[in-house]
Image (cartoon, rainbow, N blue to C red):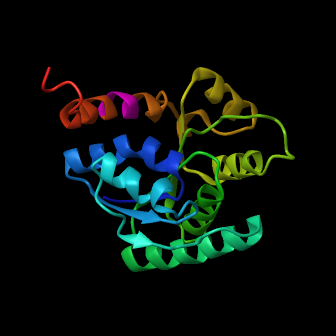
Amino acid sequence: MSIAIVLGTRPEIIKMAPVIRECRRRGLEHFVIHAGQHYSYEMDRVFFEELELQPAEYNLDAGSGTHADQTGRIMAGVEKALMNREPDVMLVQGDTNTVLAGALAAAKLQINVGHVEAGLRSYDRSMPEEINRVVADHISDYLFAPTEGSRANLLKEGIAAEKISVTGNTIVDSVYQSREIARRKATALRDQ
């Protein structure tokens, strides 16, 4: 099984780090597509370095712009990467334009989509993130809900129960793993 992991923002890097590590630990074939929605060193590469992650195999450098421009650039770049690698499943996380673009590109190529952090709702359609969440959930094949409340939201929207798994939030795993990395790298109290 081959897994594509699409991310594009600092929170996505942090929250998907445990998933990337687990793929590596299990020896699963996987690769990372970085959309570049956040693109400065301080909002991007530093997190790969500090979280001890390999650089992304694909960097789309989508940058900023209107929602449509950015989403379109990301979708086109993700599509090319997916056509090149032909993964069995693609994972997206959260509610960004990267999530929407990645989920749409994969679904149109008949690649299964897994949405990490599925079912979160603000019920405010004036928020672009709410639209991204809802659309991504409804075209996903695997929905990883962080809470029972998120699962209930998905069920109310007519998503089949067998597609939903309550997994908790990967940010918790990231905090624990980052704590271990910080302990190894800490120098402030070593001489004491």
Of residue 148 and residue 56, the one placed in the foreground of this image is 56
- Seen at 45% across and 75% down, the residue is 81
Of residue 165 and residue 84, the one placed in the foreground of this image is 84
Location of the C terminus by quadrant is top left
Dominant secondary structure (helix, strand or loop) of the stretch shown in magenta = helix
Q: Quadrant of residue 185?
A: top left
Of residue 186 and residue 80, the one placed in the foreground of this image is 186
Q: Residue furthest right?
A: 126
Q: Residue furthest front?
A: 192
* The magenta segment: 173-177
Q: Residue 8's x, y, as percent?
A: 53, 59
- Seen at 51% across and 50% down, the residue is 10
In the displayed structure, does residue 181 sit left or right of residue 43?
left
In the displayed structure, does residue 49 sit left or right of residue 35?
left
Of residue 124 and residue 190, the one placed in the foreground of this image is 190
Location of the N terminus by quadrant is bottom left
In the image, residue 16 lies in the stretch drawn in magenta: no
Q: Residue furthest left?
A: 191
- Seen at 56% across and 60% down, the residue is 38
How many numbered discs?
0
Q: Residue 90's x, y, as percent?
A: 46, 58
Q: Quadrant of residue 86?
A: bottom left
Q: Residue 110's x, y, as percent?
A: 53, 67
Q: In the image, is residue 150 above or below residue 144?
A: above
Q: In the image, is residue 9 above or below residue 192?
A: below
In the displayed structure, does residue 98 sit left or right of residue 192?
right
Q: In the image, is residue 23 above or below residue 65?
A: above
Q: Residue 72's x, y, as percent?
A: 68, 73
In the displayed structure, does residue 117 sit left or right of residue 72?
left
